[in-house]
Amino acid sequence: MKLRFFDIIKALSGIVLKSSSKDERSQVESIKTKILNFEIVFLCEFMHHVLNDNNYETKTSQRCDINLDEASRASAKINTKMQIYRNYFESFKYKARGRARKYGIVPNLKRSRQRKVEKYFDELASDYQFHNRKKYLKLLFSRMY
């Protein structure tokens, strides 16, 4: 998706302009607004690096004639690379900002409004959601792989 991001947006815009169905246009517009988001650009940047760097190891581990020693070495390499990636959050964010500016997307993470109403027990017992998107993405980033 990172490599064809502009083509995807262009195709969605073409569908909006050429479609005669109002429902289809509204669905495509909602998809387009969701894609034109800094978090999507950031995740595309991260996943592009992860998938490209681990491509050889995953292909090696999927071979039919692989022995256990090779598979464990490939798995260990992927594990060390993923541990290194956890420390590169800011560099991925910097690269994603450059790409977002290129596409005309505001390079800021979304901020959600904090609740001012009183919480009840069932709301307190539910999973905690981060209101700061940067902390939320860092948490996702550290738990991936």
Image (tube, rainbow, N blue to C red):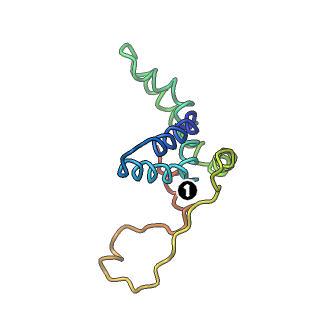
Q: Left of 139 or right of it: where is 24?
A: left
Front one among 95 and 79: 95
From this viewpoint, is residue 42 visible?
A: yes
In the displayed orientation, state which residue is furthest to the top: 65
- Label 1 sits on what residue type? Lys
Taking the spot 66% from the left edge, 51% from the top edge, the residue there is 90
> What residue is disc 1 on?
138
In the displayed orientation, state which residue is furthest to the front: 20
- Badge 1 local density, few (<14 within 10 Å), some, or many (20+)? some
Front one among 7 and 75: 7
Taking the spot 35% from the left edge, 51% from the top edge, the residue there is 23
Q: Position of residue 17 (x, y in %)?
A: 49, 44
Q: Position of residue 53 (x, y in %)?
A: 57, 31
Q: Left of 121 or right of it: where is 94?
A: right
Front one among 65 and 73: 65
Q: How many marks?
A: 1
In the displayed orientation, state which residue is furthest to the left: 122
From this viewpoint, is residue 81 visible?
A: no
As helix, strand or loop, the secondary structure at mark 1 comes to helix
In the displayed orientation, state which residue is furthest to the bottom: 118
Front one among 72 and 134: 134
Taking the spot 39% from the left edge, 22% from the top edge, the residue there is 62
Q: Position of residue 83 (x, y in %)?
A: 56, 43
Q: Position of residue 88 (x, y in %)?
A: 64, 47
Residue 138 placement: quadrant: bottom right
Vertical order, 22 against 53 (above or below): below
